[in-house]
Amino acid sequence: MNKLEINTAQNVKIQYNLASLGSRMIAFAIDYFIIVCYFFFCMFLLDALDITSRDPYLFYGIIMGMTLPAFFYTLITETAFGGQTIGKKIMKIKVVKLDGSRADFYQYLSRWTLSIVDIWMTMGGIAITAIVLSKNGQRIGDIAGETSVISLKPSLKLSDTIYEETFENHPILFPQVIKLSDKDANAIKEVYQTAFERRDVGILTALVQRLETVMEVKHPEKMTPNDFVLQVMKDHYSMFKDK
């Protein structure tokens, strides 16, 4: 899976999994289905009220007003749900800025406006081509809004990467973990679990800085923050597992 790599203000590299083209297309299909169902509901309701026979102009006015939310569906939901439509929530993908933080209204507006061109006017042809060719999986709307779509699905369970591994002959890279108590280790695991599930740059960066302070060690530049925190937890487990 392609990665979106960013550098924080503290020069810490964070990686996100980019949403796959398939998951984005399924999310779009779910959203499109919701919009179509809403249109049919509006037509059914107006037909039941028999407004057409009374005043056709009133009917068209009401139908335009009722279907307006469907027209702005993507803009409304992404703004309200922090970068997710209902389809994106189901598929566990999310729109973010290229620095991994939450996008703002004007970026959602750029994506929505240009979706008219790269999705609706070309049946998704331009959007698909741009996503495939773009380094960060961006369609035209993403490029204009400086956003991308990431996956919120963890590639591994946290337990698969830490305590369920075999620690035979595990090299301890940071002997400074001796400064961490069992309470500290549990707190680190809980904080990392939160950052891991939310894909939260701020939490992970703060955790790395805290470990550097407590352990009096510098996070190696060649090691990602994820790998650094995992290594610290593994080192602590290996050092104290027999005690």
Image (cartoon, grey):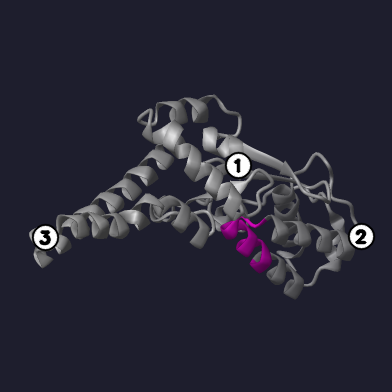
Q: Position of residue 148 (x, y in %)?
A: 57, 41
Q: Name the residue under label 2.
A: 216
Tell which circle, 2 or 3, labels the residue nearer the N-terminal end: 3
Q: Nearer the viewer, mark 2 or mark 3?
A: 3
Q: In this view, does 232 lie above or below 26?
A: below
Can residue 205 be seen in the rendering of this structure?
A: yes
Residue sitting nearer the eye, 129 or 16: 129
Sort mark 3 into few (<14), some (14-19) or many (20+) by Cα contacts within 10 Å. few
Tell which circle, 3 or 1, labels the residue nearer the N-terminal end: 3
**Label 1's element?**
helix
Q: Mark 1 points at which residue?
A: 145
Q: Which of marks 1 and 2 is in front?
A: 1
* Disc 1/disc 2 C-alpha distance (Å): 40 Å
Dot 3 amino acid type: Asp
**Label 3's element?**
helix
Q: Where is residue 143 in the image (x, y as percent from the top left)?
A: 59, 35
